[in-house]
Amino acid sequence: MKLSRQEIKQAMILAHTIRKEAAIKWGCRPGDIIFSMCLQQSFNIIKIRKRTSIVKPKPKKNYIPSLYLTVACIILITILGVNTKIDRYYNSFVAAIVENERLLEIVNLHEREVRATENFYKKEIGFLYNQIGNLEEMLSCKIYTYQAAINNLGISMKIDTPSNFSAEEFERAWQVLGAKGMYGTGELLVQAEKETGINSLVLGALAYHESNGGTSKIAVEKNNLFGWGAYDSDPYYYARTFATRGEGVRYVAEEVKDKYADRGLNTLVKMNRKYASDPKWSIKINAIMRKIAMAAIEDPQRMLEYEMITNIKED
């Protein structure tokens, strides 16, 4: 169908109108819409008008209003932005939880280490307190024995009370007293006290007295520092023989414990009644205890600075 010049001119005007209306509806500039398309559309409209004599073309109903489109875009962008923020906050929250768990683990580990250290030092402190208690008890026994000997109260002191004199102190006493026959017996006396509980100062004084400072024939030839078993009728013959002096000291300590201390004869006075025919034997042993104690302690005055013992009485 051919168009006249007038119809072509109308088509051109209509194309510009379509272009403007489309730009308004689509929310863009007229220049963004291709003019040839609008012109082709106007030609189609003119032809339809000629056929149907319809002046105005029907508007298309499938155009999306630009306002709705804009609002939808804004909502979409907002949602995407909110999601991005949510993701960022979520990631930060997860990171905070992980960091918190790590710190909590460090704190728990530190607390375990602190508790372990605290328990360790509690045990160490407890051990030290026990050691201090043991040392105080040992010192108390030593002071008790020393003061009893010095104050001539040894005859009433219980012979199963440990003296806690050291081997070095006994050896020092033998050197001071010139008792060469007693050299080397300090360790034997200390060990016998640990095994039997019999006071080593009592044992030392008994050995010194019975062997004349370790020089008697029975002590030298039979390793019997105590003259144990020697009867007055024939002392050498009846005296027991030991393989070593250590064996003799250990044997006599056990005999004193079994036959005297454990049977209630636990002081020198009581022991004297059964052990020796000499009624002054206990006094002589106490005198030797005094000599050994004074020679054994380097600073005897310090031992006397403690409160004097006044409650040592015969049972």
Image: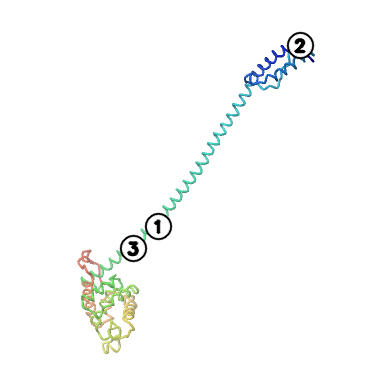
Q: Secondary structure at mark 2?
A: loop
Mark 3–mark 2 Cα distance, whole angstroms, equals 130 Å
What amino acid type should be assigned to the residue bearing mark 2?
Answer: Ser
Q: Quote the CA–CA distance across marks 1 and 3.
A: 16 Å
Question: Relative to residue 205, is residue 311 depicted above or below?
Answer: above
Quadrant of the rendered image containing residue 182: bottom left
Vertical comparison of 289 with 21: above or below: below
Image coordinates for residue 97, horizontal then vertical, percent: 51, 42
Residue at the far left in the pictured view? 301
Callout in the foreground (2, 1): 2
Q: Nearer the viewer, mark 1 or mark 3?
A: 1
Q: Residue at x 45, y 51 (%)?
A: 109
Q: Tell me the number on the disc at residue 120.
A: 1
Mark 3: few/some/many CA within 10 Å (<14, 14-19, 20+): few
The image quarter in which residue 223 lies: bottom left
Q: Amino acid at mark 1?
A: Phe
For label 1, the SS is helix
Is there CB contact under 8 Å for labels 3 and 2?
no
> Nearer the viewer's eye, disc 3 or disc 2?
2
**Residue 1 position by quadrant:** top right
Residue at 30% over, 67% down: 138
Q: Give the residue number, with chain letter if any, for mark 3.
A: 131
The image position of residue 165, as x and y in percent, is 28, 71
Mark 1 neighbour class, 10 Å CA radius: few under 14, some 14 to 19, many 20 or more: few
Which residue carries the number 2 mark? 4
The Cα atoms of the two marked residues, 2 and 1, are separated by: 114 Å
**Coloured how?**
rainbow
Residue sitting at x 21%, y 65%:
302
Sequence-wise, the earlier of marks 3 and 2 is: 2
